[in-house]
Structures are given as C-alpha cells and as structure tokens.
Amino acid sequence: MTPPLMEVQAVAGTQMQPASDAAAVAPSGRFAQWFTGEVEQLNTQLVNAEQGLQQLATGTAPSLHEVMIRMAEARLSFQLATQFRNRVLEAYQEVMRMQV
C-alpha cells in the first residue's frame, strides 16, 4: 500500500497534512490557487516596503528599523520566489529532455 499523497501548504511554516480522499488529490487547481496567493503576498510585501521607503523619504515613517525590517522581508521573499521559479523551470526542462 502506498503512503497517502500530501497537500501543498504555504511556505510560512505550516505543516503538511495528508489528503483525506481521492478527490483531494485530483488536479483541481489547488497549486494554481496556492501559487496565486503566494504571488499576491509577495506583491503586498514589495508594496509595503516601497511605501515604507516613501514614508522614510518624506519623514513620516514610524521608525527606520521598521522600514528596514519590511525591506529585508520583501527582499528575502523575492529571493525565495526567484529560487522557486528557477527550480520549477529546471524541473520542466528536465522533463522535456526525457526520452519517451
């Protein structure tokens, strides 16, 4: 008997849980929904960092530390998204090189 398939969860530290039934493992766009949510979250972080820089430039920022933390979080999230894209692209290219 094979182990149950695992659902993909957000990268934010949540634990993976086994799928409950066969319908849950059928292609239903869950990956697309997850990926869209992650891209939206990344965009929100980038916009927040940009707004923090604008506030810092105008002198209305709450503190330099908060702005720097938001910028670091946005940078790390962007680097993670870039690495994810690179790995997916490498996997796709590897599949395309397979001989059938």
Image (cartoon, grey):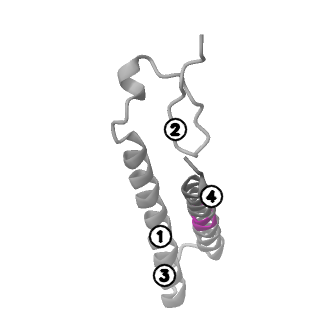
Between 13 and 5, the residue placed more toward the observer is: 5
Task: Please rate how many residues cluster around mark 2, counting C-alpha atoms within 10 Å: few if below 14, some from 14 to 19, many from 20.
Answer: some
Camera-nearest label, 2 or 3: 2
Vertical arrangement, residue 66 with respect to residue 64, above or below: above
Q: Earlier in the sequence, mark 3 or mark 4?
A: 3
Q: Earlier in the sequence, mark 1 or mark 2?
A: 2
Label 3 element class: helix
Query: Is the residue under label 1 in contact with that under label 4 (CB below 8 Å)?
Result: no
Q: Is residue 80 magenta?
A: yes
The answer to whether marks 1 and 2 mark residues whose Cβ atoms lie closer than 8 Å is no
Q: Earlier in the sequence, mark 2 or mark 3?
A: 2
| 3D distance between C-alphas at marks 4 and 1 | 27 Å
**C-beta proximity under 8 Å, tags 2 and 3:** no
User: Which quadrant holds residue 21?
Assistant: top left
Residue underneath mark 4: 87
Q: For mark 1, what is the residue?
A: 48
Q: CA distance from mark 3 to mark 4?
A: 36 Å
Q: Which amino acid, mark 2?
A: Gln
What count of labels does the image hold? 4
Q: Secondary structure at mark 1?
A: helix
Q: Dominant secondary structure of the magenta stretch?
A: helix
Range of magenta residues:
78-82
Is 23 magenta? The answer is no
Check disc 4 and give the amino acid type. Arg
| Residue type beneath disc 1 | Asn
Looking at this view, is 33 or 49 the one in front? 33
Q: CA distance from mark 2 to mark 3?
A: 34 Å
The amino acid beneath tag 3 is: Gln
Residue under label 2: 9
Q: Position of residue 95 (x, y in %)?
A: 57, 52
The residue indicated by pointer 3 is: 55
Cα distance, mark 1 to mark 2? Answer: 24 Å
